[in-house]
Image (spheres, helix red, strand yellow):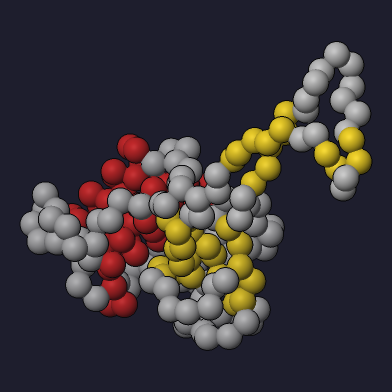
């Protein structure tokens, strides 16, 4: 399911350079292993909020357009215990624009959960001691529907009590 190219941001600059190879994949909403790649996992809802705002390429109040470097700086501030002081890897970025993203996430992202058609962060933690990243994929839309049952493999269904039907939910995939 995760085969293919993705946009990604670094989630732990303490570990080595980016590495292509086997990695453990975690939803940004599941409990991460205690020795996981993120110091402040409780801020992943804010990171997911950032991912879903479409900042990159839009105009900033600070001037210019937001960049992936601006987004990366904000993510480091939320997830790292010691964010990098060397920002040369960020490319085109502005402290003012990056701070706008961070401030907006703190003000609006608490408790954010992406819905149908929005993006969810997936953390890729390499098996070797290498740099983990967060990629984002679209949240699948799963419709909840109901059905009335009255037959089970050709056998009549016995409904309990005075009911004439049983209500249940199922997922279509």
- In the rendered image, the residue lying farthest to the top is 162
Residue drawn at point x = 34 percent, y = 45 percent: 105
Residue 13 vs residue 137, the one in the foreground: 137
Residue drawn at point x = 91 percent, y = 29 percent: 158
Whether residue 115 sits left or right of residue 164 in the image: it is left
- In the rendered image, the residue lying farthest to the bottom is 20
Measured as percent of width and height from the top left, residue 44 is found at: 49, 51
Residue drawn at point x = 52 percent, y = 84 percent: 19
Whether residue 74 sits left or right of residue 39 in the image: it is left
Measured as percent of width and height from the top left, residue 121 is found at: 48, 59
> 75 above or below 21?
above
The quarter holding residue 128 reads: bottom right
Mark count: 0
Residue 140 vs residue 156, the one in the foreground: 156
- In the rendered image, the residue lying farthest to the left is 63
Measured as percent of width and height from the top left, residue 94 is found at: 19, 63
Q: Quadrant of the N terminus?
A: bottom right
> 107 above or below 94?
above
Measured as percent of width and height from the top left, residue 164 is found at: 80, 21
The quarter holding residue 25 reads: bottom right
- Whether residue 169 is visible here, answered yes or no, is yes
Residue drawn at point x = 40 percent, y = 60 percent: 76
Q: Quadrant of the C terminus?
A: bottom right
- Whether residue 81 is visible here, answered yes or no, is no
Residue 41 vs residue 135, the one in the foreground: 135
């Amino acid at each position: 399911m995760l085969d293919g190219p993705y946009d990604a941001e670094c989630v732990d600059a303490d570990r080595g350079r980016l590495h292509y190879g086997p990695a453990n994949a975690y939803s940004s909403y599941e409990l991460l292993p205690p020795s996981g790649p993120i110091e402040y996992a409780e801020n992943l809802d804010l990171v997911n909020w950032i991912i879903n705002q479409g900042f990159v390429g839009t105009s900033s109040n600070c001037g210019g357009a937001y960049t992936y470097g601006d987004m990366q700086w904000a993510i480091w501030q939320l997830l790292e215990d010691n964010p990098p002081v060397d920002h040369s890897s960020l490319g085109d970025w502005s402290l003012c624009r990056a701070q706008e993203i961070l401030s907006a996430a703190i003000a609006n992202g608490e408790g954010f959960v992406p819905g149908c058609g929005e993006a969810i962060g997936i953390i890729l933690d390499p098996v070797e001691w290498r740099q983990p990243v967060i990629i984002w994929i679209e949240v699948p839309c799963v419709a909840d529907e109901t059905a009335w049952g009255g037959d089970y493999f050709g056998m009549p269904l016995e409904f309990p009590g005075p009911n004439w039907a049983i209500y249940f939910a199922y997922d279509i995939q």
